[in-house]
Image: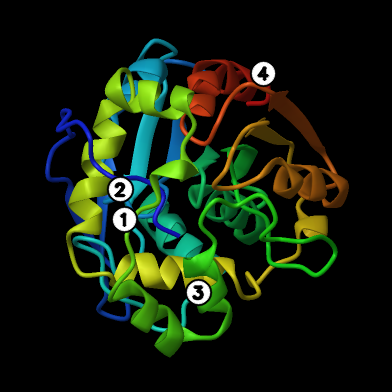
C-alpha cells in the first residue's frame, strides 16, 4: 500500500539509534529526548512506506506540548531487521522492546495511515502501559463485514497482499504510485507543512521493498489481536475525502472498539487530515 511519493526533499531527522533484541534482530529508532510535560512520551507509528524518521510537524507539535516522541522503523525498513511472516502485533513487539530499553514505562500510542494498526497493537500487547491511542487515517483489519476496498483509488497492492507474499512481491516489480490517490488538499499539505513526509516516503520507497511488502501483508491478514479487547481510550481521526483509506474503515472500527470516538473531517484527504495532529495530541494530554 504505497501511500506517498516524494515531491519535496524536506528536512528529515537524524540517523537514529539501534536497539538489539534478544533474538539478535536490530530495531532502528528515533528519539527527541526527554519531554517536559505531563504526557512524558508518545510513540509515533509511521505509514507505508516510510523510514520511521521523525517528521518535522510531529516533532514541532509535540515539543510545544512538552512531549517526547519516539519512532521505530518496522521490520524490513532501513535499519530494522526483517521479520518474515510478521503480523501487526509482531511489529508492535519491537516498539515495546525499545520502550523497555529506554526505560519508558507508560506512553501514548499514535499512528498515521498504516501506523494506525500498529498504534492499536501496542495497546493490545501492553494495556497497562499505553494510556491512550490516536490514529489518523488508519486502516481497519481486513473483514467481509463491509467492502474493504471500496473507495480506494488504488487497491492493487492490498489485493495482491490478500493472495500472499509471492503475488505481492510480483506486484511490486511494476507498481507505480497513482496520483489520483490524493486530493488537492493532500498535495498542498505535501508541498507545505508535510513536505518532510513526502521526502521520507520517497527515501523508503526507493530502498528494498521488504518493509512495504511486509506492511501490506500484515494489514490484509489477521493482525494478531481483536479490536474488541482493547481497554484504552481510542481517538479515530478520518478524512471524509480520503481515497487511500476510505471513511468506512474508521466507521467500522468505531463500532468494534469499546472506548472510541471518531473525529470526521469531511473535507480532508489522506495527508491533509494530519493537520489535526496537534488537536489529537491535546486529546491525549487529557487522558494521561
* Few, some or many residues within 10 Å of mark 4 (<14, 14–19, 20+): few
Disc 3 secondary structure class: helix
Upstream in the sequence, badge 3 or badge 1? 1
Q: x and y percent of residue 69 in the render?
A: 37, 33
Depth check, mark 3 against mark 1: the one in front is 3
Residue with the mark numbered 1? 73
Residue at image position (70%, 55%) is 150
Q: Are marks 4 and 1 in contact (CB under 8 Å)?
A: no
Does 69 sit left or right of 180 as displayed? left
Upstream in the sequence, badge 4 or badge 2? 2
Q: Is residue 109 visible?
A: yes
Q: x and y percent of residue 40 in the render?
A: 46, 27
Upstream in the sequence, badge 4 or badge 1? 1
Depth check, mark 3 against mark 2: the one in front is 3
Residue with the mark numbered 3? 217
Q: Quadrant of the N terminus?
A: bottom left
Instruction: Pick the residue in front: 273 or 18.
Output: 273
User: What mark, if any, has residue 52 been given in the picture?
Assistant: 2
Which residue in the rendered view is the most extreme toward the top?
64
Upstream in the sequence, badge 1 or badge 2? 2
| Separation of marks 4 and 2 at Cα, in angstroms | 26 Å
Q: Quadrant of the C terminus?
A: top right
* Few, some or many residues within 10 Å of mark 2 (<14, 14–19, 20+): many
Q: Note whether 159 is above or below 185 in the view shown.
A: below
Q: Are marks 1 and 2 in contact (CB under 8 Å)?
A: yes
Does 79 sit left or right of 37 as displayed? left
Depth check, mark 4 against mark 1: the one in front is 1
Disc 1 secondary structure class: loop
Residue at image position (67%, 55%) is 140
Which residue in the rendered view is the most extreme toward the bottom?
166
| Separation of marks 3 and 4 at Cα, in angstroms | 35 Å
Residue with the mark numbered 4? 286
Amino acid at each position: 500500500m504505497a501511500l506517498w511519493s516524494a515531491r519535496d526533499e524536506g528536512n528529515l531527522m537524524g540517523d537514529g539509534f539501534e536497539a538489539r533484541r534478544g533474538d539478535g534482530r536490530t530495531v532502528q529508532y528515533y528519539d527527541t529526548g526527554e519531554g517536559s510535560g505531563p504526557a512524558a512520551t508518545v510513540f509515533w507509528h509511521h505509514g507505508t512506506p516510510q523510514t520511521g524518521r521523525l517528521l518535522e510537524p510531529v516533532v514541532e507539535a509535540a515539543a510545544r506540548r512538552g512531549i517526547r516522541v519516539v519512532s521505530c522503523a518496522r521490520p524490513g525498513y532501513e535499519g530494522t531487521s526483517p521479520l518474515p511472516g510478521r503480523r501487526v502485533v509482531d511489529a508492535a513487539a519491537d516498539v515495546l522492546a525499545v520502550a523497555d530499553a529506554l526505560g519508558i514505562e507508560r506512553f501514548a500510542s499514535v499512528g498515521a495511515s498504516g501506523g494506525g494498526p500498529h498504534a492499536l497493537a501496542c495497546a493490545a500487547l501492553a494495556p497497562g502501559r499505553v494510556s491512550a491511542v490516536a490514529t489518523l487515517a488508519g486502516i481497519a483489519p481486513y473483514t467481509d463485514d463491509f467492502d474493504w476496498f471500496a473507495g480506494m483509488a488504488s487497491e492493487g497492492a492490498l489485493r495482491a497482499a490478500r493472495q500472499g507474499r509471492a503475488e505481492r512481491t510480483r506486484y511490486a516489480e511494476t507498481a507505480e504510485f497513482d496520483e489520483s490517490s490524493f486530493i488537492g488538499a493532500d498535495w498542498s499539505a505535501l508541498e507545505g507543512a508535510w513536505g518532510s513526509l513526502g521526502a521520507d516516503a520517497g527515501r523508503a520507497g526507493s530502498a528494498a521493498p521488504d518493509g512495504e511488502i511486509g506492511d501490506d501483508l500484515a494489514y490484509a491478514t489477521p493482525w494478531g489481536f481483536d479490536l474488541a479487547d482493547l481497554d484504552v481510550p481510542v481517538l479515530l481521526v478520518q478524512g471524509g475525502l480520503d481515497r487511500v483509506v476510505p471513511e468506512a474503515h474508521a466507521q467500522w472500527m468505531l463500532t468494534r472498539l469499546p472506548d472510541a470516538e471518531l473525529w470526521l473531517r469531511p473535507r480532508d484527504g489522506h495527508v491533509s487530515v494530519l493537520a489535526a495532529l496537534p488537536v489529537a495530541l491535546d486529546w491525549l494530554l487529557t487522558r494521561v
